[in-house]
Image (spheres, rainbow, N blue to C red):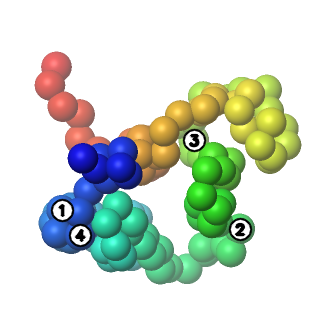
Amino acid sequence: MDRRAGRIDNETNKRICRKLQENIKKLSDIEIIFEPVREHRALLTLRGDGLREEILETDPQKTGLPPLPVLLSSATCRPDRVDRFGERDCIAGGLGRMPTVYLMGLALAHARRLEKFGA
């Protein structure tokens, strides 16, 4: 029995990162690098002009704590009434509270890097 809630193993992580890297190399003029770390953890590196250091990770670095707040900003994002960035403010925002596994897909979709599927 996996006591870690079904986390993926190192080989699966490497395979997923390799697949992501093969399919997503650039976003506009930003170079994107996916690197496996260990088990379910991976590193996303963004390189390019105009990036700012305000981008932070969501891992609180302590077991048992929820992920840190995330801000997703794009011309395609639906506006909400939140005008500050903090844990309580983010919960009230358009993303609300959600598993962070969905964050990359949302970010790619709002960057218009996903093709429409079906329809």
Q: Who comes first in sequence, dot 3 or dot 1?
A: 1
Give the label on residue 75, or none.
3
Give the label on residue 54, or none.
2
Q: Is residue 9 above or below residue 49?
A: above
Mark 4 neighbour class, 10 Å CA radius: few under 14, some 14 to 19, many 20 or more: some
Task: State the residue at coordinates (23%, 70%).
Answer: 10
- Which kind of residue does numbered mark 4 sit on? Asn
CB under 8 Å between callouts 4 and 3? Answer: no
Where's residue 64, x and y in %? 61, 50
Secondary structure of residue under mark 1 = helix
- Which kind of residue does numbered mark 3 sit on? Ala
Mark 4 highlights which residue?
10
Task: State the residue at coordinates (48%, 39%).
Answer: 99
The Cα–Cα distance between marks 4 and 2, rounded to whole angstroms, is: 30 Å
- Which kind of residue does numbered mark 1 sit on? Thr
Q: Who comes first in sequence, dot 4 or dot 3?
A: 4
Where's residue 32, x and y in %? 37, 72
Dividing the picture into quadrants, the one containing residue 45 is: bottom left
The Cα–Cα distance between marks 2 and 1, rounded to whole angstroms, is: 30 Å
Foreground: disc 2 or disc 1: 1
The Cα–Cα distance between marks 3 and 1, rounded to whole angstroms, is: 34 Å
The Cα–Cα distance between marks 4 and 1, rounded to whole angstroms, is: 6 Å
Mark 1 neighbour class, 10 Å CA radius: few under 14, some 14 to 19, many 20 or more: some
Where's residue 108, x and y in %? 39, 49
Q: Who comes first in sequence, dot 3 or dot 2?
A: 2
Q: Is residue 46 visible?
A: yes
CB under 8 Å between callouts 4 and 1? Answer: yes
The Cα–Cα distance between marks 3 and 2, rounded to whole angstroms, is: 19 Å
Give the camera-side residue of 61 and 55: 61
Foreground: disc 4 or disc 2: 4
Mark 1 highlights which residue?
12
